[in-house]
Image (cartoon, grey):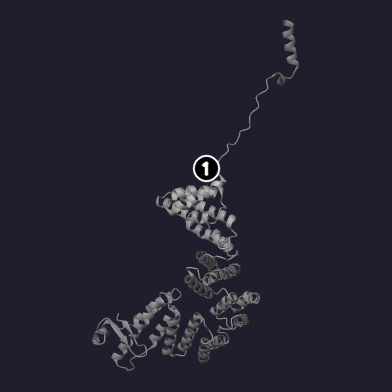
Amino acid sequence: MKFKTLLAVALCAAIPAMACAKKPKKQKEPVEPVVVDPYLIPQDECEDYFSLEHESLKNKDYETAYEQWKAVFTTCPGIQRQLYTDGAHILEALYKKAKEESNEPEMIRIANEIMNMYDKRMQFFGDDERYPISYILSTKAVDYRTYFEGTEAYSRDTVYAWLHEAMKHDQASPFLSALEMLFNMSYENYTADKTNQEKADLFVEDYNNVLVGLAILVDDTTYANRELAGQKKDWFDQVFAQSGVADCDKLDELYGKVVEANMNDYSVLRRLAALYRQMDCEESPVYAAAIKQMQVLRPAESYGSGAAGMAKKCLKNKDYQGAIANFKKALGETSSANDKADYLYLIAQCYYASKSYQSAADYAKQSLGVKPGQGRCYMLIGNCYATAKPYPGNTAKDKILNKTVFWAACDMFEKAKADPSTASKAAAAIATYSKYFPTKEERFDLPKEFKGTTFFVGGWVNVTTRIR
């Protein structure tokens, strides 16, 4: 026994220690727990959940509707487009609730979920004929600004990039708010640094994309805000024309090839012709080519082409009588209300420059009759009134009564203040002309003439005004 024991000890000493030691147990690799999305449901139950969600939404049970909607959204995001319309309503309602409760973490969670919903919609319904990527992405941009502006996560550049990208896609169903936002942001970028040619070119590009979208909305007889879209277009045209971003040569450079490529597209030619008129570029050969082709496409309609261009050439040369004659001819050549309003106003300007103030005021009023609310017309009428002397005598009484024209003039300037394009000029005019109102002492000397609260200004002015 002793020998066997010694032999075992010797053998153990001869073999490496590790071979004699017990092998440690092999460690098992940690197994990641399987996380099951609580909203994941069997595929064949999506339709049932969707029907329940839709009913809950109708009943404004937003909490229940969300649970049901989330299950369908998680499992079957491509079930149908209505899922995303419902989701927008549900999430908006939950966001408002969280905001009322000042629950900022929940507000952020819901806002992020709204953004994720738009991404999924573009993935599954980006090719939808009625509401394609252009609509989805622009709506996402508008909502992003709504939910994130003022937070650290907000990026103005992100909004602009999305809007700009949206306009590059199919314009089947543009979003009016997005068009307005894109135009305003692009205009702000340009005016922040007018020496930056890249920003100037981008503003021109964005302006054109916006006009394409607006034209679709204006031509859509089923669109509820069709009239508003037309008003926005007029405003965008005015801002663009006054921005100084492009002169007539620049317009020709930009749109010469566009006209050539769209000789059979009346809507494009009409839009470009309107822009040229707005920019006073009716002498341009590109404009002439567009007008000529429009007459070929729709010969029943007529357009102010040669006469208006000749009139503006006369106006530049201060040939006011020649300008008046051609503008009057142009009135008979156009069926556009905007053109008629412009030509009537320009005739009024020519008469004013010729010191024919009564005629100037009359034509400015006619322009307002065609297109109400034009601040430029009210300014012109006010300036005409301020020149009038309805009481031709040279007595002290006549001199006092002639001051009443400034009341009438300021009535017009007050109306011009309602137009953003003339508001500042109107305020300045009121400050200037109000200094010439009849004084209290002067009115006291003529109690018979200035009794009551109103005064009739005679002569060609022929209006009743307020005593002040």
Type of the residue with mark 1: Pro
Decide which of 347, 382 is in the foreground and name it.
Answer: 347
Q: Is residue 12 left or right of residue 400?
A: right
Looking at the figure, which quarter contains the C terminus?
Answer: bottom left
Q: Position of residue 371 (x, y in %)?
A: 45, 79
| Foreground of the two, 112 or 321 | 112
Task: Give the percent coordinates (x, y) of residue 186.
Answer: 54, 66
Q: Quadrant of residue 206?
A: bottom right
Q: How many marks?
A: 1
Q: x%, y% of residue 228?
A: 47, 70
Res 156 seen here? no
Is 420 drawn above or below residue 313 in the view shown? above
Q: In the picture shown, does residue 183 fall above or below 359?
A: above
Q: Residue at x 47, y 90 (%)?
A: 354
Query: Furthest-bottom residue in view?
Result: 393
Task: Tell me the crowding category of disc 1: few under 14, some 14 to 19, or many 20 or more residues within 10 angstroms, Cα based.
Answer: few
Question: Looking at the rendering, in which quadrant would you find the N terminus?
Answer: top right
Q: Residue at x 73, y 11 (%)?
A: 8
Q: Nearer the viewer, residue 288 or 90?
A: 90
Q: Residue furthest top?
A: 1
Percent x, y for residue 192? 53, 67
Image quadrant of residue 58? bottom left
Where disc 1 sits, the SS reads loop
Does the rendering let one see residue 166? yes
For label 1, the residue is 38
